[in-house]
Image: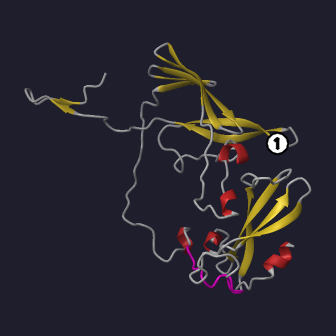
């Protein structure tokens, strides 16, 4: 079924098919299914030899839908291509499916214009160290006191937050993040992943590095994750704790003495 759908297109020399697996985004009204996964299809230009070449610039107007339990393709959904001559309609594309597409690279080595020049180094230094204290999962800074946790679904979580000895929150976390891609025409309406519930923010957390993700004096935290087989593994440096100067919130000038200052307690 999938090979027959791909055979409808003539891809230029040097292009291969790339598939992004996505959550199904919810069933249609009246649809009976166990658990589906949809594949968003693109063509990737391999002629540069760079694996980071942007294949999202070359969408293919089909989405294979797979039964995630049986691993069988149950159907092929068709899409409008968005080409200049098809009026955003279904099935009006030519066999040369990439004729209306153009390159849109974003990695520096593949871009036609150079990166911004003339930027001098910005060094963040804290010669006396940090103003926060860490004891295991307990973090204290100024009048704040809380514990840091980590979950596969939510990533970093904060627990038992106190300010100046007063209880503020029992548990604090992000609950969900989703981006509806703004096209109500089926099957585009299912292109909406719940990044926490479908994928797991904690499982997608980067392994942070000094100078790349964080500046200054850093305290890193690891997390212990469990795999599908139940075995534990350590995810290194998934949380970075550091202090950041956010500037003066407001400034006041005394018109009588001309003394200036933030006057913040």
The residue under the point 75% across, 55% down is: 28
List x then y, in percent, for residue 151: 70, 35
Q: Nearer the viewer, residue 210 or 57?
A: 57
List x then y, in percent, for residue 239: 60, 38
- Of all residues, the one furthest to the top in this rendering is 165
Q: Nearer the viewer, residue 27 or 181?
A: 27
Q: Nearer the viewer, residue 246 or 26?
A: 26
- Could you tell me which secondary element the residue under label 1 belongs to? loop
Q: Quadrant of residue 5?
A: bottom right
**Label 1: few (<14), some or many (≥20) within 10 Å?**
few
List x then y, in percent, for residue 219: 56, 34
The residue under the point 49% across, 26% down is: 132
- Quarter of the picture containing the C terminus is top left
Secondary structure that dominates the magenta span: loop
Decide whether residue 40 is among the magenta residues. no
Magenta-drawn segment: 93-104
The residue under the point 85% across, 54% down is: 68
Q: Quadrant of residue 156?
A: top right
Q: Quadrant of residue 110?
A: bottom right
In the image, is 195 to the left or to the right of 34?
Answer: left
Decide whether residue 100 is among the magenta residues. yes
In the image, residue 36 sits, relative to residue 101, either above or below, namely: above
In the image, residue 32 sits, relative to residue 66, either above or below, namely: above
Residue bearing mark 1: 227
């Amino acid at each position: 079924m999938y090979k027959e759908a791909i055979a409808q297109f003539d891809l230029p020399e040097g292009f291969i098919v790339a598939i992004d697996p996505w959550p199904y985004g919810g069933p249609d009204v009246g649809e009976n299914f166990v658990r589906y996964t949809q594949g968003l299809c693109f063509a990737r230009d391999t002629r540069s030899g760079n694996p980071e070449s942007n294949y999202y610039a070359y969408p293919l107007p089909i989405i294979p839908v797979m039964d995630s339990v049986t691993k069988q393709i149950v159907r092929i959904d068709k899409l409008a291509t968005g080409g200049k001559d098809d009026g955003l309609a279904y099935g009006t594309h030519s066999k040369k499916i990439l004729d209306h597409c153009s390159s849109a690279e974003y990695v520096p080595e593949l871009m036609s214009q150079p990166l911004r020049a003339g930027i001098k180094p910005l060094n963040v230094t804290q010669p006396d160290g940090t103003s926060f204290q860490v004891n295991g999962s307990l973090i204290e800074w100024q009048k704040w006191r809380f514990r840091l946790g980590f979950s596969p679904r939510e990533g970093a979580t904060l627990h038992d937050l106190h300010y100046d000895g007063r209880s503020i929150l029992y548990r604090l976390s992000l609950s969900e993040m989703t981006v509806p891609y703004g096209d109500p025409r089926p099957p585009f309406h299912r292109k909406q992943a719940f990044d926490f519930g479908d994928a797991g923010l904690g499982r997608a957390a980067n392994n942070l590095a000094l100078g790349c993700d964080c500046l200054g004096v850093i305290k890193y935290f690891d997390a212990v994750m469990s795999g599908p087989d139940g075995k534990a593994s350590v995810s290194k440096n998934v949380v970075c704790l550091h202090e950041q100067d956010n500037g003066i919130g407001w400034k006041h000038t005394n018109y009588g003495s001309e003394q200036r200052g933030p006057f913040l307690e």
